Image (spheres, helix red, strand yellow):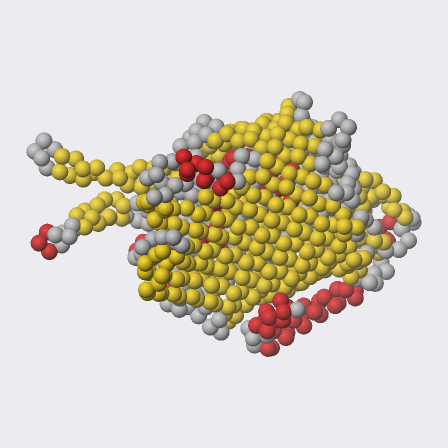
């Protein structure tokens, strides 16, 4: 109750009452009218329900139900719900209709349905004996392929994550996302990603509708998503549905599995750096289920053994680890109601020492922790055969803390945190065969502490490692804000060839300084199906972002978030895209060869960066004085060629793009390349099924080096009487240099095992090499100096650039099991 009342109090303060009341009544009016209208439609029968997996009771997202007689069908939403309208005038004289229910990897069900009245009917699909293994980007159903699939959206095949060669053998959702066209990565090994010229902080990452503020473990080398329990994941790069907002560039929507409702199951995996274990099963068969999953690294268990073997004066290795805990409960309350409770907890810790070690006692120590936790309570309700609603209460938190102790001198502690509490209501209204209407509202209350800083100095106690403070400095900032949004959209099927999707999202923000912003965010998409093998699409979307992060370090999770206020306006973006897709050579392979080509242009407004020579301390009331506001733009083209069935599957993804930023106070007001502006990015992925359940997998990556700022020259500056010599670098335009090009080949092998007498037991062994030809890709560039003396004894200093590489060829092995 407190979770609801607390943000609601702020909600009523954030707008003038007329706008608030009008908006609420508008949403309620549409919702009530939709629910009441859905109960009476004498011109048609309505079939609705869920499509599920027969072995687990898990609902299937994107499963299709199709009628050849009507030449139309329906697709399940993210909760596995479908609604099919059967006009009486189209089947006049018939007392039944034939239906085809299908989903990739499952056996198709043919059902003859008697027509007498509206029906709520669930369908169970059994896993196919021979699964058509697809690669990263997949189609979920074959009916009307040319028009149905949305451009600018990447759908991840979760089953294939384990087969993709990854660093240290850890299946990683975000690394798979990085193989998509239009998606850039940060530094090598980073779990962060950038979409169509945007920054990492301009991506919204959702886990069961809760925001994940930091998606990476171990400084970004692994993602927080445990692939063992992911049900589905979609990345929106453009053509954003109106129900999404709050960020400018990308929306990654991830849903956890619901838990097996029909049988208890144990799954796990053992790798070189981490292991995971999942248990799930019914609390009451076909009525309630549970799912618990955990993952942890164990490198920290071996670090003390290594450190004890090192010489006394040697630098000690830091002890580091991370863990993830996921839990979910799924309860069917009745034919029309369902309840989901899900939670995630994850944390990293790095602890160590540096400098001198005297009598085996480190003189300087540090302890850094950071992590996310989220919780979601969702209630699904079916108002009628054509109206489905989802109500969610969501909480999310990110916390970063560090502590440094300099013995005999100083202790330093700092941290930053973000809390948000959200409520959202989403309604799906299947009006008729031409209109699928969605409407809803969302409210989020933010509590942000961009800095929590303490500095103590004094004399330390070597026995207790405690510091007796003689001086003390502290600073703690806390800011509150409220964000809201209402949306309405209509997926309008004009005819068999043309579909128009229209949406309007109205978002707003009320900050701690009582500054109010609001922004209309129109969305539109037009799809034209030329024939069964060719379609085109054009789309437009406007996005707004009220929560900001300006990078100051390589560790993005340590950079604080801050809210819009009277000095810092919301960031906004407009994006247009146009593209086409085709399928051919279907006589050679069932799904054919699929080609997608898309072009985009994105305008970015009210972008933020630090001014030249700005001193970064922490977020305070004068923080805006250290920032500068500008604009940006990016444009490019994306090509994808994929083969998604048969013994060999694979894809070729190529991106040609430009990304620019322009600030009046930087680079003389001239536009300069964004840090992650990369002209060419190529990803080639392939998988081949060998006999005796062996498989070989490979992916090759190439990308232009990222832009960076380096000094062009240096000169000596002398103080008075030629003392106080100072070396001053000379810079040219911002980001005028490039890192060397990056390329890498990964190769992996997989062997699947099945028990001859125990059908439920299965296992697979994966091994391979990350960076197979050991390309030493530059991680960062630095300068070294060298003093040179000529034959006359004159000394000069020469500076030369050098690079540091992180990863040579790294072998991996992992074992996964299920029973």
Q: Which residue corresponds to the image point at 71% horizontal and 38% vertical from the top-left?
A: 104
In the image shown, does 475 or 737 lie closer to the viewer? 475
Q: Which residue corresponds to the image point at 71% horizontal and 59% vertical from the top-left?
A: 379
- Give the answer, above or below, for where 762 lies relative to 690: below
Quadrant (top left/top right/bottom left/bottom right) for the C terminus: top right
At which x and y percent is residue 118? 86, 55
- Give the answer, above or below, for where 492 lies relative to 751: below
Instruction: Judge left or right: residue 148 versus residue 51.
Output: left
Q: Which residue corresponds to the image point at 43% horizontal and 31% vertical from the top-left?
A: 808
- The residue lying furthest to the top in this view is 691
| Number of marks | 0
Asked whether residue 5 is in view, the answer is: yes
At which x and y percent is residue 693? 67, 25
At which x and y percent is residue 337? 77, 58
- Give the answer, above or below, for where 428 lies relative to 598: below
At which x and y percent is residue 783? 28, 41
Q: Which residue corresponds to the image point at 56% horizontal and 29% vertical from the top-left?
A: 767
In the image shown, does 810 or 565 lie closer to the viewer? 810
In the image shown, does 229 or 179 lie closer to the viewer? 229
Quadrant (top left/top right/bottom left/bottom right) for the N terminus: bottom right
Instruction: Judge left or right: residue 297 versus residue 365.
Output: right
Asked whether residue 535 is in view, the answer is: no
- The residue lying furthest to the bottom in this view is 17
Instruction: Judge left or right: residue 442 versus residue 462.
Output: right
């Amino acid at each position: 109750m407190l979770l609801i009342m607390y943000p609601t109090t702020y909600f009523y303060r954030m707008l003038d009452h007329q706008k608030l009341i009008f908006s609420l009544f508008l949403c309620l009016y549409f919702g009530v009218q939709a629910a009441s209208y859905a109960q009476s439609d004498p011109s048609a029968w309505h079939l609705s329900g869920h499509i599920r997996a027969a072995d687990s009771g898990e609902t299937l997202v994107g499963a299709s139900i199709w009628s050849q007689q009507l030449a139309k069908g329906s697709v399940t939403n993210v909760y596995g719900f479908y609604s099919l309208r059967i006009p009486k005038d189209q089947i006049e004289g018939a007392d039944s209709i034939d239906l085809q229910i299908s989903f990739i990897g499952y056996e198709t069900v043919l059902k003859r349905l008697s027509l007498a009245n509206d029906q709520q009917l669930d369908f169970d699909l059994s896993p196919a004996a021979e699964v058509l293994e697809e690669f990263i980007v997949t189609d979920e159903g074959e009916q009307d392929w040319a028009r149905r699939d949305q451009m600018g959206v990447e759908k991840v095949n979760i089953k294939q994550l384990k087969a993709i060669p990854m660093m240290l053998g850890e299946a990683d959702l975000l690394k798979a996302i990085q193989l998509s066209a239009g998606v850039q990565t940060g530094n090598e090994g980073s779990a962060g990603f950038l979409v169509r010229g945007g920054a990492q902080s301009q991506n919204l990452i959702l886990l069961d509708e809760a925001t994940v503020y930091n998606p990476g473990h171990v400084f970004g080398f692994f993602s927080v998503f445990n692939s063992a329990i992911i049900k589905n994941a979609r990345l929106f790069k453009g053509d954003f549905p109106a129900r999404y907002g709050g960020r400018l560039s990308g929306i990654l929507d991830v849903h956890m599995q619901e838990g097996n409702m029909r049988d208890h199951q144990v799954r796990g995996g053992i790798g070189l750096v981490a292991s995971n274990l999942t248990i799930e099963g019914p609390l009451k068969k076909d009525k309630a289920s549970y799912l618990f999953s955990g993952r942890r690294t164990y490198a920290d268990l071996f670090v003390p053994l290594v450190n004890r073997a090192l010489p006394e004066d040697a630098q000690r290795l830091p002890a580091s680890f991370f863990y993830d805990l996921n839990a979910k409960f799924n309860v069917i309350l009745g034919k029309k109601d369902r309840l989901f409770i899900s939670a995630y907890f994850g944390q990293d810790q790095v602890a160590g020492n540096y400098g001198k070690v005297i009598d085996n006692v480190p003189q300087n120590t540090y302890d850094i922790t950071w992590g996310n936790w989220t919780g979601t309570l969702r209630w699904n309700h079916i108002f009628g055969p054509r109206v489905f609603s989802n109500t969610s209460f969501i909480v999310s938190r990110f916390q970063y803390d560090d502590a440094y102790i300099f013995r005999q001198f100083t202790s330093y502690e700092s941290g930053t945190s973000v809390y948000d509490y959200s409520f959202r209501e989403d309604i799906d209204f299947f009006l008729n065969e031409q209109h699928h209407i969605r409407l809803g509202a969302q409210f989020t209350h933010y509590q942000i502490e961009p800095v929590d800083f303490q500095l103590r100095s004094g004399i330390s106690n070597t026995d207790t490692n405690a510091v007796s403070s003689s001086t003390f400095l502290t600073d703690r900032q806390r800011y509150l804000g409220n964000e809201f949004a209402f949306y309405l959209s209509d997926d309008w099927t004009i005819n068999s060839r043309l579909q128009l999707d229209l949406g309007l999202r109205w978002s707003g923000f009320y900050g701690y300084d009582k500054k109010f912003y609001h922004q209309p965010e129109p969305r539109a998409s037009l799809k034209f199906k030329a024939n069964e093998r060719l379609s085109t699409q054009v789309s437009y979307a406007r996005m707004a972002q009220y929560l900001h992060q300006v990078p100051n370090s390589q560790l993005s999770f340590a950079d604080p978030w801050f809210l819009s206020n009277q000095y810092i306006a919301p960031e906004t973006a407009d994006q247009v895209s146009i593209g086409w897709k085709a399928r051919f050579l279907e006589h050679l392979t069932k799904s054919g060869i699929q080609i997608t080509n898309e072009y985009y242009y994105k305008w970015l407004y009210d972008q933020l960066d630090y001014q030249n020579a700005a001193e970064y301390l922490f977020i305070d009331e004068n923080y805006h004085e250290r920032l500068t506001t500008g604009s940006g733009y990016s444009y490019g083209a994306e090509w994808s060629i994929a083969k998604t069935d048969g013994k060999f599957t694979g894809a070729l993804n190529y991106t040609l793009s430009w990304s620019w930023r322009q600030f009046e106070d930087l680079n003389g007001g001239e536009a300069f390349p964004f840090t992650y502006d990369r002209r060419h990015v190529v990803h080639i992925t392939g998988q081949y099924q060998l006999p005796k359940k062996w498989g070989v997998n490979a992916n090759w990556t190439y990308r232009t080096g990222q832009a960076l700022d380096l000094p062009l020259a240096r000169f000596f500056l002398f103080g008075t009487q030629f003392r106080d010599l100072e070396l001053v670098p000379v810079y040219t335009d911002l980001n005028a240099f490039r890192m060397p090009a990056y390329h890498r080949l990964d190769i992996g092998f997989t062997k699947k095992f099945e028990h001859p007498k125990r059908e439920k037991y299965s296992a697979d062994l994966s091994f391979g090499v990350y960076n197979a030809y050991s390309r030493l890709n530059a991680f960062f560039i630095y300068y070294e100096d060298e003093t040179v003396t000529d034959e006359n004894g004159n000394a000069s200093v020469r500076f030369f650039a050098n690079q540091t590489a992180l990863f040579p060829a790294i072998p991996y092995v992992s074992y996964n099991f299920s029973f």
